[in-house]
Image: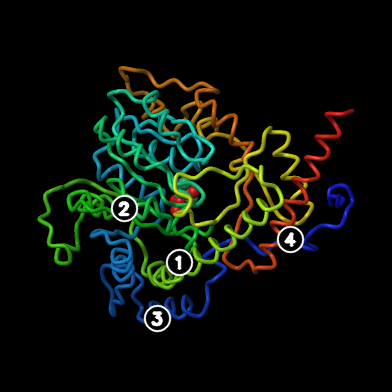
Amino acid sequence: MEKLAIDGGTPVRSKPLPPPFRGSMLIGEEETNAVSNVLAAQSPFRYYGPNMQYAVQTLEDLIAKDLNIPYVLGVTSCTAGLVVAMKALGIGYGDKVIVPANTFVATAGAVVSSNAVPVYVDMDESLNMDPDDLERVYDEEVKAIIVVHINGSACDMDKIMAFAKKRDLYVIEDVAQSQGCTYKGRICGTIGDIGVFSFQMNKMLTAGEGGAVVTSNPELFERAVRYHDQGSFRDKDRYQIDPKFVMSGQNYRMSELTGAVMIEQWKKLGTIIGTMRKHHRNIRAAIAAELPDVKFRAAADDDGDIGCVLGIVHPTLERARAYASAMKAENVSTHSMYDGVPVYKIPCFFEQRTAEKDNFPYNYPFKKPVIYTEDMCPKCVDLLGRITITLISPILTDEEADEIARAAVKVLKALDAKAGAGAHS
Ligand SMILES: *Cc1c(COP(=O)(O)O)cnc(C)c1O
């Protein structure tokens, strides 16, 4: 038995893995030149300028073509995009929106910013929403489900879409963490009514900030365009839509600088996903060859997973924590998502606190009051901390991917041995 680094042994790797960012680690001359061109043209705004480059429009057309979807809108962030999506769908004060218990704060925060109130659906071993829990949170004041394809892997869309159809709910897909992931051959973000992507630093592709909203529905698109641009629809020629939705809006417009970077990033998505998938496959195969009983994170569609994390389900929280600490000592950074805390347990959501004096929008007199309890999503409470993730990046070498597998095998075997010894003592 190899001595673990955490117990004074030699670590599998002598230094930490390279930074785990994806698209940002592949930023190169292409992005630099693209930004320079926009600046040289002195036209960093998408709708007018002395020498327009149409970078955002080019990006939107590129995404539309690759996703095979007619309408794409660049926005400032995924959070903004989620708000735009809800306003396009007419969701607001007095509405409830189903949000997964395991997601980043932005998903729930965007619901509150849209003046609606989140209700939370439980999670399963895929780290994604448990579609069998949807009925529990449904009532007639619920208008939509925000499906979050978390950490590279698709939700169980057949079940979710069937439920949405039965209950007449809109479906918004939050694809912030899973750009490029597919479900049964369909691209995530194009399955529900509206899909939203993120181009923030920590995501698969990045310009530092940015996002995109996609839909097949021209009316939703027009409403989205209006809400994101102060209520106006400047692009009538391009889409030939008869404007009839007058509303006040916000400014969530994408800058040409972002657009220029994102065109180059977008072209790299195939390479990024291809490399991560290869490493993910090889790492799991190497672990399973040594430890056939290891339980990997479940997946609704394993083939569509983009491979951005290695997920392992541990039998107990203590064991997951011991694994993560030991992996870190081997120089393979490993953790549980969001420190094992479901999003609804974060105080601002749990205590229903907003920036408003009267606690708007939680103050709406709902027929069925929205009451949160600590254990309302018991599977998420139980599982989130028990599932560890190790980030896989597209700049890992085959050697580094192999070291991740070797560290996992080394640590799992040692923890098994310790547990065995404990059981006999
Ligand atoms: C990062 C993230 C967002 C927010 O994206 P921004 O572009 O930073 O606004 C939304 N949802 C999920 C699941 C995320 O991980």
Judged from the image, the secondary structure of the residue bearing numbered disc 3 is helix
Where is residue 417? Give x, y as percent: 82, 40
Q: Residues within 10 Å of mark 3 (few under 14, many from 20)?
A: some
Judged from the image, the secondary structure of the residue bearing numbered disc 1 is helix
Q: CA distance from mark 4 to mark 3?
A: 37 Å
Q: Which residue is mark 4?
A: 16
Q: CA distance from mark 1 to mark 4?
A: 25 Å
Q: CA distance from mark 1 to mark 3?
A: 22 Å
Q: Residues within 10 Å of mark 1 (few under 14, many from 20)?
A: some
- In the rendered structure, which disc, 2 or 1, sits on the residue that comes first in sequence? 2
| Horizontal arrangement in the rendering, residue 218 relative to residue 16 (left or right) | left
Q: Which residue is mark 1?
A: 269
The part of the image, by quadrant, that contains residue 160 is top left
What amino acid type should be assigned to the residue bearing mark 1?
A: Leu
What amino acid type should be assigned to the residue bearing mark 3?
A: Asn
- In the rendered structure, which disc, 2 or 4, sits on the residue that comes first in sequence? 4
What amino acid type should be assigned to the residue bearing mark 4?
A: Pro
Disc number lying in front (2 or 4):
2
Q: Residues within 10 Å of mark 4 (few under 14, many from 20)?
A: few
Are dots 2 and 3 in contact, CB under 8 Å?
no
Q: CA distance from mark 2 to mark 4?
A: 37 Å
Depth check: 299 or 20 in front? 299
Disc number lying in front (4 or 3):
4
Where is residue 127? Give x, y as percent: 52, 40
- In the rendered structure, which disc, 2 or 3, sits on the residue that comes first in sequence? 3
- In the rendered structure, which disc, 4 or 3, sits on the residue that comes first in sequence? 4
Where is residue 210? Give x, y as percent: 42, 59
Residue at horizontal 69%, vertical 57%? 404
Disc number lying in front (2 or 3):
2
